[in-house]
């Protein structure tokens, strides 16, 4: 929910077009007429032909009730436990935004300022570092860095350090 802000892609979580946070609070942010139009542009995964299913999900199993937009993107509200997420923030967009801003400005202000300085020195954004990590994971035959073995993870960290990626950035992007 906070990745786009955490990785300095945007300062406002709803501004990032690929964020799932929009779908969690959609009914509070978008007039009902637009939600109806969006729903008209969706179909259930089970209604797609084999080639379309293969193009979207590959060989992975996808529940038949997941909704797919006309542009063949799976609607995030299909796989996100919206009720649970909204309950966490008291079913309120303002609580979510307060939490985002509080964490970024109050409790971790010094760390974030140091991270910005480190990024300027290293020359890599978090998105670029995450790209290095994704490429390395794919070369190891893993779907994600979460599936890397311990020795593979150590090798990746060593490679990142050779590229002058700072340790805080490595920890942040690898969730260490």
Image (spheres, rainbow, N blue to C red):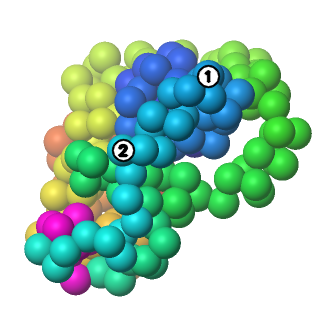
* In-image side of 128 versus 32 (left or right): left
Whether label 1 touches label 2, CB < 8 Å: no
The residue positioned farthest toward the right in the image shown: 90
Q: Is disc 2 surrounded by few (<14), some (14 to 19) or many (20+) residues within 10 Å?
A: few
Vertical placement of residue 174 versus 142, above or below: above
For image coordinates 61% across by 34% down, the residue present is: 26
Vertically, is 129 above or below 141? above
Question: Circle 2 is placed at which residue position?
Answer: 41
Residue 146 in the image: above or below residue 17? below
User: In the figure, is residue 96 to the left or right of 39?
Assistant: right
**Residue at numbered disc 1:** 31
x and y, in percent, of residue 64 in the image: 43, 77
Residue 91 visible to an observer of this rendering: yes
Q: Is residue 141 visible?
A: no
- The residue lying at 25 percent from left, 54 percent from top is 72
Q: Specify start and end residues of the magenta stretch as a single range.
A: 52-59
Magenta highlight on residue 31: no
């Amino acid at each position: 929910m906070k990745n786009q802000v955490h990785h300095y892609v945007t300062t406002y979580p709803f501004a990032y077009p690929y964020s799932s946070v929009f779908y969690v609070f959609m009914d509070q942010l978008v007039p009902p007429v637009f939600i109806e139009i969006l729903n008209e542009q969706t179909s259930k995964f089970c209604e797609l032909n084999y080639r379309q299913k293969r193009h979207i999900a590959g060989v992975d199993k996808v529940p038949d009730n997941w909704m797919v937009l006309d542009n063949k993107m799976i609607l995030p509200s299909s796989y996100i436990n919206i009720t649970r997420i909204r309950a966490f923030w008291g079913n309120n967009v303002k609580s979510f935004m307060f939490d985002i801003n509080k964490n970024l400005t109050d409790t971790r202000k010094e760390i974030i300022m140091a991270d910005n300085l480190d990024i300027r020195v290293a020359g890599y954004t978090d998105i670029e570092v995450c790209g290095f990590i994704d490429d390395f994971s794919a070369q190891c035959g893993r779907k994600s860095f979460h599936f890397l073995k311990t020795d593979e993870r150590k090798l990746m960290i060593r490679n990142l350090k050779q590229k002058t990626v700072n340790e805080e950035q490595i920890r942040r992007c690898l969730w260490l």
